[in-house]
Every structure is written in structure tokens, then in C-alpha cells.
Image: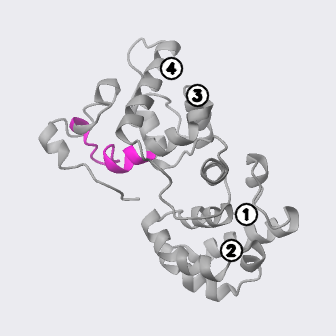
Amino acid sequence: MPRKFAGESPLALTRRARRISRVLTETYPDAHCELDFTTPLELLVATILSAQTTDVRVNLVTPVLFAKYRTAADYAAADRAEMESIVASTGFFRAKTNSVMGMAQALCDRFGGEVPNRLEDLVTLPGVGRKTANVVLGNAFGVPGITVDTHFGRLSRRFGFTTEDDPVKVEHEVGALIPKKDWTDFSQRMIWHGRRICHAKKPACGACPAAALCPAFGEGETDPEKAAKLVRTSGPR
């Protein structure tokens, strides 16, 4: 497992993490949530559907879904078979339909049909964990949150920010290194970097702008020309 730089103090780790954050900011100045949405409810639904599939796939499905169901009450009263047919291509469609309908019913029962803007409320909804809640908080409400998806967790360990696998522990350890106001943007840039350069199986180390700051440099292709061929302009998402 990737380790911190030998002998790195907590202060040095914090400084290095913030330098990496600045590098990622320069590299991905337009980083944003790649799920299409116009309201908090749409983002919440899209994020639930994004489990175990790509943002691209979800974005192909949601225009039909969002046109048909506009409110939490619409989702709660939906014909289950019809919704399942719409979201089928995202995989696990029965479980996702259960989550979306259950989430919508909970919104109607406990929050007046509106998506709450507090983490402690969001995580009480069916199908909504901390990752989904932080996506919605950060991107729909402007409330800072760290989104620990597979990309974020992998990069956090490679960069030596944490050695934890548990998403909640990763969230807290990395959150202590980065200013709270930057949490949402930092999360998105880490995700973009994971999708484009720091891949799971063969990271493009030789093309990584943060290579000099990364303890895991060398896990992937280090030759700049060969690494450049591994870089993706987007996704897989």
C-alpha cells in the first residue's frame, strides 16, 4: 500500500496535500459534477442511479426520467414497472427504483417534498449514504463536502493522505488536510484526475502534473511519451 513520504511530519503532509490541491486546480480549472441536473432533487436521483455505472450512462437515462417525474410526489407515486424500464440500462434497476421511490416518499413524509440541505437529514433517506449526500450538498446547495468515491479513495491512498479503506475515515482524514471551503472542488478535481490520469490499473505516472509530490510515483507508466497515450480526455465516468 502506498505510504507517506519517509519521515513526513503532519505539517509537511498538510503542506504537500495543499500543494497537490493547487496543482489539481491548475490542471482542472473547469472541473465540475458530470451528472446532468437542474435541481437538488434531480441531482439526488441521478446520484442514486450512478451507483455501479457511469455518469455518461446515467445522463442518457435522466432526460426521460426528469421529464416524466418532476416532484418527489411524482416519484413516490410512480408506476414501479415503468420506472424500472426507464432506468434498466443503469444496472441494478430494481434496487435503484426501490431507493428512488423510497427516498421520494421519505421526502414527502418528513421534509415537505423538498430535498434537505443538511448531511444528517440526507443520510436518513433510503439509498442515500454520505457519498451521495456530499455530492448533493456540494453541487446543489454549495455546502462544502468531500465525496469519497472509488477514484477519490484510490488517489487519497496513493498520494499518502491516508492509509484507510473505510470511506468515512478517508473523508475525515483528508478533510483535515484541505480547507473546508475547498472540499467540494477538491473532491471533483481528485475524481477528474482519477478518471483521466491516475487510473486504477495503469496510472499514467509520467504524465501526472503531481508526480513530484506523489509517494506512489512508479506504480504506473513513468515514460512521458508512453504515459501520454494512457491519458483520457474524459471518463470512464
Nearer mark to the viewer, of 1 and 3 = 3
**Numbered disc in front, either 2 or 3:** 3
Decide which of tag 4 and tag 2 comes sooner along the chain.
4
On the image, numbered disc 3 is attached to which residue? 179
Question: Which of the two residues, 83 or 72, is positioned nearer the viewer here?
Answer: 72
Separation (CA) of disc 4 from disc 2:
42 Å
Name the secondary structure under disc 2. helix
Q: Dot 4 lies on which element?
A: helix
Nearer-N-terminus badge (1/4): 4
Q: Can residue 142 be seen in this view?
A: yes
Q: For the residue labelled by badge 3, is the local secondary structure a helix, a strand or a loop?
A: loop
For image coordinates 49% across by 31% down, the residue present is 163
**Which quadrant of the view contains residue 100?**
bottom right
> What amino acid type should be assigned to the residue bearing mark 3?
Pro
Q: How far apart are marks 1 and 4 (CA)?
A: 36 Å
Question: How many other residues sit within 10 Å of disc 4, few (<14), some (14-19) or many (≥20)?
Answer: some
| Residue 197 in magenta stretch | yes
The amino acid pointed to by label 1 is Pro
Q: Which callout, 1 or 2, points at the residue further toward the start of the chain?
A: 2
Please provide percent x and percent y for residue 96: 62, 71
Left or right of 195 on screen, residue 49: right
Q: Mark 4 points at which residue?
A: 14
Q: Residues within 10 Å of mark 3 (few under 14, many from 20)?
A: few
Residue closest to the eye, 62 or 106 = 62
Q: Say if mark 1 contacts mark 2, CB within 8 Å.
A: yes
Q: Where is residue 50 in the image (x, y as percent from the top left)?
A: 53, 64
Range shown magenta = 191-206
User: Could you tell me the amino acid type at mark 4?
Assistant: Thr
Q: Residue 126 carries which label?
A: 1
Q: Where residue 203 sits: x, y (%)?
A: 28, 43
